[in-house]
Image: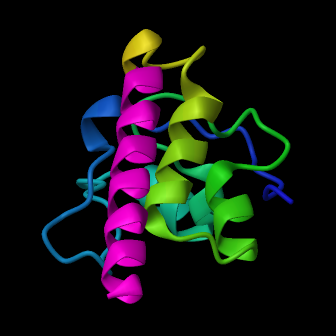
């Protein structure tokens, strides 16, 4: 289930990851923001909105817990967020991943049948 997240406001201009993916986001010289990042679950920190944090179960939690592969996980992500973030464009992205999956699976089935 989603982490129990404290109400912490992160300044938008600081919500990015530096080049090293295992490093904390750039928090500048603000020790309060740095401490909040260090203490928060990764599920509590979201760049670019709050469309996942408000859910009971975030897509990443469901996808990870069920071992769902990338294409299927992308469909889940886009279909979950379309009303709150990308609108029709997110539905098109979900459809694109479904089309890719169908194409790749059909090709794999043909290769296997040879």
Side of 69 where 67 appears, left or right? right
Q: Please tell me which residue lies in front, 71 or 16.
A: 71
Q: Measuring 29% from the left and 43% from the top, which residue is drawn there?
A: 14
**Spot occupied by residue 112 in the image (x, y as percentages of width and height):** 39, 87
Screen quadrant of the C terminus? bottom left
**Spot occupied by residue 73 in the image (x, y as percentages of width and height):** 54, 57
What kind of colouring is applied to the model shown? rainbow
Is 104 included in the stretch rendered in magenta? yes
Q: Please tell me which residue lies in front, 55 or 102.
A: 102
**Spot occupied by residue 1 in the image (x, y as percentages of width and height):** 86, 60
Most prominent secondary structure in the magenta stretch? helix
**In this view, 6 is above or below 43:** above
**Spot occupied by residue 21 in the image (x, y as percentages of width and height):** 26, 75
Q: Measuring 42% from the left and 66% from the top, which residue is drawn there?
A: 105
Side of 77 where 15 appears, left or right? left
Give residue 51's quadrant in the image. top right
Q: Measuring 49% from the left and 19% from the top, which residue is drawn there?
A: 85
**Magenta residues (range):** 90-114
**In this view, 80 is above or below 42:** above
* Residue 37 visible to the viewer: yes
């Amino acid at each position: 289930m989603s982490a129990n997240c404290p109400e912490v406001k992160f300044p938008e201009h600081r919500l990015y990851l530096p080049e090293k993916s295992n490093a904390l986001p750039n928090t500048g010289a603000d020790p309060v923001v740095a401490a909040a990042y260090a203490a928060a679950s990764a599920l509590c920190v979201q760049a670019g909105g709050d469309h996942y944090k408000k859910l009971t179960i975030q897509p990443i939690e469901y996808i990870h817990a069920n071992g769902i592969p990338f294409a299927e996980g992308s469909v889940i992500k886009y279909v979950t967020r379309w009303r709150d973030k990308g609108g029709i464009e997110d539905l098109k992205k979900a459809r694109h991943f479904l089309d890719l999956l169908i194409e790749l699976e059909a090709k794999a089935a043909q290769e296997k049948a040879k």
